[in-house]
Amino acid sequence: MVEEKNWHTHRDAKNTRLASASSLLNGKFAKTEDVVEVLNTLIKPGDKVVLEGDNQKQASFLSDALTKVDPERVHDLHMIMSSISRPEHLDIFDLGIASKMDFSFAGPQSTRVSQMIADGTMTVGDIHTYLELFGRLFIDLIPNVVLVAADKVDREGNLYTGFNTEETPTIVEAAAFHDGIVIVQANEVVDKLPRVDIPSDWVDVIIPADKPYQLEPLFTRDPQAITELQILMGMMAIKGIYAKHHVQTLNHGVGFNTSAIELLLPTYGEQLGLKGKICRNWELNPTPTLIPAIESGWVQSIHSFGGEVGMEKYIAARPDIFFVGKDGTMRSNRALGQVAGQYALDMFVGSTLQIDQWGNSSTVTNGRLSGFGGAPNMGSNPTGRRHSTQAWQSLKPDDDPLAKGQKLVVQMVETFGSNKKPVFVDHLDAEEVRKEAKLANVPIMIYSEDTTHIVTEEGIAYFYKTDSMEERKAAVEAIAGVTPVGLRSNPEEVNKLREKGIVALPEDLGVRREDANRSLLAAQTMDDIVEWSHGLYNPPAKFRSWS
């Protein structure tokens, strides 16, 4: 007789934990002042813990409380975070509460992450893309506890995450359906929610926060800071890539280069007769610099990874464009946005900190382990794609009967970064960082093989037309300016590349450098954007120094 096996050990363990905290709970609700003791009781040594900290919304009340738990009771946690954004995200390692980290992005804390790895204070599992990290929550990084943030909660424990839903449902689902514990900080407890984003039976503990969760306006760029060099690059991109390939579906990474393009669509794009022919369907956060294009009839739809501070009223008034619920609030979704970015788009346009002589790029540099966010999802050619569009087919080789199209993956960089260091280098700093951080692979953000175009102030390199790595290297050199890589460029070789269409300078595209001036921007100040929005856009305070 075979002894009957217990198939619900995880559920038993969860129920035991929750029972141990019963004196701290009234149903699902705990008192604000009991938050530290709740975490002391429900989190166990060695747990895999997801702390919500994407690149905008932070479970800041819970992250602060986590630094105050007793390291004798809670230690050696394996943290799983899409973004390491706040100081306390790393303080827990100094305090001995956590020891290992799997993450996607660490921009604000990238220098400190690098130092902690060097000191041995933190062990890194891997650096992931957002989608990759979310996927692993359902496979081999299944969390024991998740700590997330909600805007509102009703008396039954249903959650409203509203404008900034982002990745919260994905994180919660990974725990709720595999006997993990879901702990939620809530800005407000109400009798009735505008809508239910996460049902109460997915939630175990709710703690009213002492103040609203942190929310950052990360995707807002002031038009006053856009330079004429960036306008020139935008003009080349519109004419030499967007129009050339008839790009309809796309994502813009955040930056002044892409903001310039967004503000050139209603002016320069209009001059070229491109309305309705390019840039109709978007996956991106609701960037204010896209408002003039929306109002001018360029944009058909926008789905967003997350929200953007100040855009709430504008989005609510434009449900034909944005994904807006009956409550009048946008529903963002970071996980589905990453899926759309990988498979449903014709083009990704991003930027980076370094590009090597072969066209590989990374934002990981010496002393900064910043990670990637979603760029590798956006900036890769998905071999599983099967649907066809004109833009995708435009990169299809002619000499292979079984060939298929390719996503356009564009890197837009000035040859020297804001730190006055060359962007183009022979070898990425990431090669050394791999050794220092003991990573299995060099942390490359976008590989040369996936990159189809590079745009600088010097011109465009059409990588997809190259026949060899040596030809690709020559194309990089041709547009790398006066960087050490660019100074190796041979004028005779550049002319051959231009004849083959592998390199295009502004004059090859019919773009006059003298036309690249700020008067071409549809909005030149934040005040102009507010006017375009009919007063619906409300810029955050730090962007209110209008001239």
Image (tube, grey):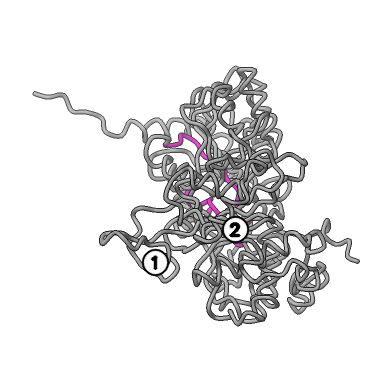
Quadrant holding the C terminus: bottom right
Name the residue rendered at 40%, 70% in the picture.
389
The local secondary structure at tag 1 comes to: helix
Instruction: Count up the numbered dots.
Output: 2
Mark 2 element type: strand
Q: Is residue 456 magenta?
A: no
- Residue 151 magenta: yes
- Up the image or down, 242 lies above or below 82; here it is below
Q: Which residue is mark 1?
A: 393
Q: Is residue 26 left or right of residue 259?
A: left
Which residue does the image show at 63% across and 54% down from the upper left? 412
Please tell me whether residue 435 is drawn above or below residue 31 in the rendered image: above
Residue depth check, mark 2 versus mark 1: number of the one nearer the observer:
2
Residue positioned 56% across, 24% down in the render? 437
Image position, residue 62 (x, y; %): 64, 39
User: Against 96, is 469 above or below?
Assistant: below
> Where on the picture, by quarter, is residue 343?
bottom left
The amino acid beneath tag 1 is Gln
- Which segment did they paint magenta? 142-170
The image quadrant of residue 138 is top left
Disc 2 crowd, CA 10 A, few/some/many (<14, 14-19, 20+): many
Residue 76, given in percent of the width and then of the height, sits at: 54, 21
Report x, y in % for residue 231: 73, 64
Separation of marks 2 and 1 at Cα, in angstroms: 20 Å
Q: Nearer the viewer, residue 14 or 123?
A: 123
Task: Give me the residue at 65% from left, 35% from top.
Answer: 34
Label 2 vs 1, first from the N-terminus: 1
Reading the image, the residue beneath label 2 is 460
